[in-house]
Amino acid sequence: MLIRKISGGWTGGVIGTFAAAGAVWLAGRLGFTSVLGINLAPKLTPAFLYPRLAWGGAWGMLFLLPLLKDQHLLRGILFSLAPTLMVFLKYVPGLEKNLFGLSFGAMPPELILIIHFVWGLVAAFWYRETLR
């Protein structure tokens, strides 16, 4: 059963990353991000996806924690806050922007949060289905 949980967590994180990357790509492709004043329209290339897939799988290991076991959607939202905080506290300041990316404007932090919610919800759904 432990191997199944590990597999479900990792795979859920990877599939959640595909969903989140697809959501960002689609938002950029449809011009939604530019309407919000965010210059973000990534291409789904291996160079864009590979690091995100590895991190997504690693973050998926959070689902092994025995928190809110029967609250799958809530777990997905809660666990999505960990990679969100990493982006806000590590990567955005590394771009020489203010903490949480507030110098980008009001919408980028919200978009980052929403994209990670997509990751968390998809990963939680996958993990739940893996354990059935």
Image (cartoon, rainbow, N blue to C red):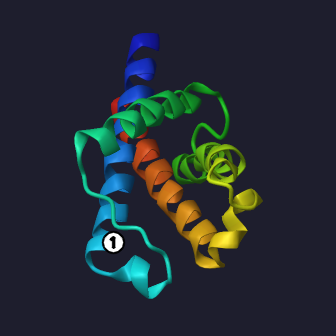
**Left or right for 68, reference 117:** right
Residue at 34% of width from left, 67% of height from top? Answer: 41
Q: Quadrant of residue 66?
A: top right
Is 31 above or below relative to 130?
A: below
**Left or right for 72, reference 47:** right
**Left or right for 26, reference 99:** left
Whole-percent x and y of residue 74?
Answer: 60, 53
Is 22 above or below relative to 131?
A: below
Residue at 53% of width from left, 53% of height from top? Answer: 73
Q: Residue furthest front?
A: 96
Residue on which the image places disc 1 = 28
Is 54 above or below relative to 68?
A: above
Q: Is residue 13 visible?
A: no
Residue at 65% of width from left, 43% of height from top? Answer: 82
Whole-percent x and y of residue 97?
Answer: 69, 60
Residue at 53% of width from left, 33% of height from top? Answer: 59
Q: Residue furthest right?
A: 99
